[in-house]
Structure formats: C-alpha cells, structure tokens
Amino acid sequence: MTMNDVVTDLSDGRIGDVTFMSSSPFEVHQILLKMNDVPKHPVSGHLFLPSNTDDVLACVVACHGSLGWRAHHLDHINYWLEAGIAVFRLDCFESRNVQSIVTDQMMVTHAMMLSDAFAALDLLKTHPRIDGERIAVAGWSLGGTVSLYSAWLPIIEALSLENNSFAAHLPIYPAAHMRPEIQRWSDSPILVLHGDSDDYTPLKFVTDFMEITRPHGVNIDVHIYQNAHHSFDSAEPVIWAQDAIRLDHRTVTIDKKGDLWAEAEPGLILPLNEPAERLAAFHYAKNIGAHFGGEPEARKHSLKLGTDFLLKVL
C-alpha cells in the first residue's frame, strides 16, 4: 500500500483525508511481544501541504492529547504549515469512536497511538511530495508520550515495517514515566517543552528521563516554562479538573523481558501489561485531579520555539 492508494480527497492538491491500516495494542508489552496477535483495522488522518510551494517537503506527524484535537494544537500546526512544513494530523480517537480519555486513560492508549504513528510514517515515506528522510513526530500530553517513546529502538523495530525512524521528536508536556531497562535509542534530536508547575504529567519525569538516557547517547533537551501548567500553550484560563487521572511520583519499568510493572510501595509490585492490571493500579493509586490552562508568554514562545526546532533539524 502506498500513499497514492489511500488518499481519498486531494482535489485541490494540498489537503486530503487519509485512511490506512493500523492496530490497537493495549500496552508496550503487546508491541514488543504480541504484535502478530493484534488485528489490523482502519484508522484515519489528514494530510496538510503548504499552499505556497510545490517542493518536496519535510513533514510532521502530529499526535493529539487526552482530550483529542484542541485549538492550541492547531495553532502549532498552522505555524508549521506557514514555515513550509507538511503536517499529517492523526485522528486516533475518531478512528476508535472515542472523544476523550482524561477520566479513563484506557479506551485509547499511547501504545495504540504509537502504532498509528509508525503506520503513518511508513505510509508517508511513499508520498511523492514528502521527503521520507525528513519526517518528524510531535505531540501534546498523551501524544507527547508517543513523540518521546517513538525514539526507543525496540518500539521502532516492532512497529515499522522497514525499521523507519523519525528524524526528530517534539514532545510537548509528555508523560515521561516509563523506564526501559534496555537502553537503545534513536540518535534523532528530541526537544521537550514542559511547564514547571505541571501536576498532570510532572516535569520531574522528564528531567529524570534525560539524566538516565543521555549517557546512552540520547540527543535530548528540554525547555522549561516557569509558572506554567499542563496545556500552557493554550489560550484558555487555568482550571482544576477534579476527575483527571494524573501521574504521581511512581515510574513504570519496561523490563528486559518486555513486561511492564510499577513498584507501588517498597516490595509491592503491580503488573501493568493488561487492561485489568492497569485498572487495578488506577484504583490503588487514586491519583485524581490536575490543573490545565495557558500561560501567555509560554504559549507565544513555544509556538515559535517548536517551529524553529523543526526547521533547524529537518
């Protein structure tokens, strides 16, 4: 299957809805060990090409957060398009008849979105207007997690048909809580944008992740916004979402066998491979409530910084 086989509307030569085949592994465990048992199904996306050029283009695969596509995500996309970068917007929720997972976190998982992202990458490499060596991945929150861990080589090797990797990664306030025991990473540059007041996906996970992975050659940096909460790049006021399932201080180990688990308390290990196990962990942790909302200076700066990063590395 190539891009020319699946684009359903490119009548104006610039934009088109795309349907392609992906899958829905529940967790990274399934990605690493059970992908042959995970059925394929259609998912959708939307390809945007800048209108001011006919050149072969760099491209960003864009991944939404737990509330789906929001206005501030589209603001970033518009900046990228105006800079001459194509964008492939994944519709991971719409493809699975889901609107939001803020209070659930199980109907669509980062593993499912990782599957979509790599299926899109393989597909975009066949498009005549896209330079297959200049495809980045960016995402917000849940999508930021996708953007970050798509640099882990075991995931690349499990999900890409050709072992294709992204040329750059732009995770925006990701959940960086997973700790693989196997430290094998792409050498593509990673820039994380995060707020120091984020109590939904705390910044400490990112700074600890950097400390662990940089000795293994990971090319990662973070820009920290002061007094900025989750969704600092939105234009909406800060609110308290009392039902949002947030992270606390606990990390998730991905061990060398491909199993996921967390140490809930010293000596108490909670397995996290399957839906029932994750649900039990949610009930045990009872981590509910977080702030969301914009910070004007951080919003303005991040729109430009993210675009400048993509232009530099692509």
Image (spheres, rainbow, N blue to C red):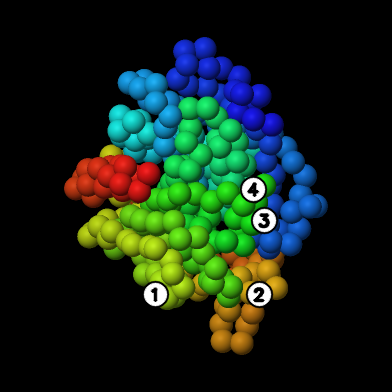
Name the residue carrying label 3: 158
Marks 4 and 3: CB-CB under 8 Å? no
Name the residue carrying label 2: 256
Which circle, 2 or 4, is nearer the viewer?
4
Q: Amino acid at mark 2?
A: Lys
Measured Cα–Cα span from mark 3 to mark 2: 15 Å
In front: 1, or 40? 1
Q: Amino acid at mark 3?
A: Ala
The answer to which of marks 3 and 2 sits earlier in the sequence is 3
What label does residue 185 carry, if any? Answer: none
Residue 105: x percent and y percent? Answer: 57, 53
Marks 2 and 4: CB-CB under 8 Å? no
Residue positioned 65% across, 51% down in the render: 159
Measured Cα–Cα span from mark 4 to mark 1: 30 Å
Measured Cα–Cα span from mark 2 to mark 1: 20 Å
Q: Amino acid at mark 1?
A: Glu
Q: Secondary structure at mark 2?
A: loop
What label does residue 162 carry, if any? Answer: 4
Residue that protrudes farthest toward the right in the picture: 37
Measured Cα–Cα span from mark 4 to mark 3: 10 Å
Which quadrant of the view contains residue 255? bottom right
Label 1 neighbour load within 10 Å: few <14, some 14-19, many 20+:
few
The answer to which of marks 2 and 4 sits earlier in the sequence is 4
